[in-house]
Image (cartoon, rainbow, N blue to C red):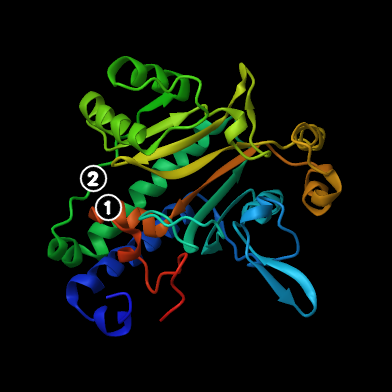
Amino acid sequence: MLDNAPVALRHPRLRAQFEITAASVTGFRAALDGLDFTEIHTPKIVGSATESGANVFGIDYFGQSAYLAQSPQFFKQALVGVFERVYEVGPVFRAEPHDTARHLAQYTSLDAELGYITDHREVMAVLRQAIAGMLASVAERAGQAVALLEAEIPEVPDEIPAIHFVDAQELLAKHTAEDPRGEPDLAPAHERWLSEWAMRTYGSEFLYVTGYPMVKRPFYTHPDPARPASSNSFDLLFRGLELVTGGQRLHRYSDYVSALAARGEDVQTYQDYLAVFAHGMPPHGGFAIGLERWTARLLGVSNIRQTTLFPRDLHRLNP
C-alpha cells in the first residue's frame, strides 16, 4: 500500500483515515483561534542545529551549511513576545535512526505557545481544550469516516487526571514486576500500564504525567521551584502512548545562561535565541502534538505509517 499510495489511497477505508486527520487539524485551529491565538508560519531551513545537534538533516544552502528544522520551538517562543499566544501546523524533521512503528523522519507537528502563565498547569488546560476541539471537529466533519472505520472516539474529561512522575514510578514499583524508581524516563510498557490505571481509576483515556526529571528535558525547560530536580513539564498519555510533550519554559536571560553552562553548551551558539530573552519575555510555555501519532491512536492503528501520507522513515523516500 505504501509503495502504491497514489492509487491505494483511493480505497474508502484508507482515505477515511485522512479525512479524520483533516478534521482534527480544523478543530485544533478553531479551538486555539477561539482562545485568541495567532497562527504563525516559521522557517523550516535553519542556520544552526541548536536544539539537538546530532539528530538533524544537514543541507547545502547556497554554499553554506544549513539544517532542516526539528521544531519551531525557538521561533514560537520568540513570537510569544510579539503575539503572546501563537500556534503553528507544519512539518518537522528528525534524523534519528529509529526503525519502529511509532517514529518518522518527517511528521506534522501541531505546536502552541502562550505567554503570561503561572506554570505548566495553564498550558495543560489549554491543551485539554485543543484536544476537545479536535475531537468535536472529527465528530462534526468526519462522522461518515468514523462510522466506516468503526472508530471509538473518546470523551475528554472536564479536567484530565494528572500524576507526578515520582508518584507514577512508585505506583509501577508497587503494582508491577518492575521497579523503575530512579530512572529518568518512562518505558513504553510503563506508559501502557499507567494508561490502564487511569482508565480504571478515573475512567479517562487521557493521563498527564508531570514533573519529569530535568536531566531528560531540554535546557529551556523551567524547573519546579519546590523540587529543582523535577521540571514544570508534562507528557499527555493517550491509550497507552505518549501523545504530547509540553511544559513551562525559562524566560529570564540569566537562567538560560546558567542552564546552558550547566550542560557544557557554548552560549555563543545560541546568541540569536538568547537575544529574545535579553529584551524581556513573559513567563510562557507550550506543547506539540504529533498529528500522525494522534490519528493512529485515535483509530487504533498499530503502525504510524498507515496514518501518514507518503511516509518518510529510515528506509523510505518514495513515492
Q: Is residue 159 visible in this depiction of the protein? A: no
Percent position (x, y) of residue 297?
Answer: 29, 51
Residue 189 falls left or right of residue 227: left
Asked if 237 appears above or below 306 in the picture, the reply is above
Q: Label 1 neighbourhood size at 10 Å, few (<14), some (14-19), many (20+)?
A: some
Inter-mark Cα distance, 1 to 2: 8 Å
Asked if 272 appears above or below 185 in the picture, the reply is below
Q: Residue 107 carries which label?
A: none
Residue extending farthest to the right is 268
Percent position (x, y) of residue 300?
Answer: 23, 53
Please state which of residues 46 and 285 is positioned toward the viewer in this rendering: 46
Residue 183 falls left or right of residue 160: right
Please state which of residues 18 and 259 is positioned toward the viewer in this rendering: 259
- The answer to whether the residues at label 1 and label 2 have Cβ atoms under 8 Å apart is yes
Percent position (x, y) of residue 141?
Answer: 26, 65
Which residue is depicted at the point 25% across and 73% down? 15
Q: Nearer the viewer, mark 1 or mark 2?
A: 1
Name the N-terminal-most of marks 1 and 2.
2
Amino acid carrying mark 2 in the image: Pro
Which residue is depicted at the point 80% across and 78% down? 63
Q: Residue 154 carries which label?
A: 2
Locate the C terminus by quadrant: bottom left
Q: Which mark is residue 298?
A: 1
Which residue is depicted at the point 32% across and 14% down? 174
Please state which of residues 169 and 120 is positioned toward the viewer in this rendering: 169
Residue 289 falls left or right of residue 48: left
Quadrant location of residue 250? top right
Q: Is residue 311 visible in this depiction of the protein? A: yes
Q: Label 2 neighbourhood size at 10 Å, few (<14), some (14-19), many (20+)?
A: some
Amino acid carrying mark 1 in the image: Leu
Quadrant location of residue 285? top right
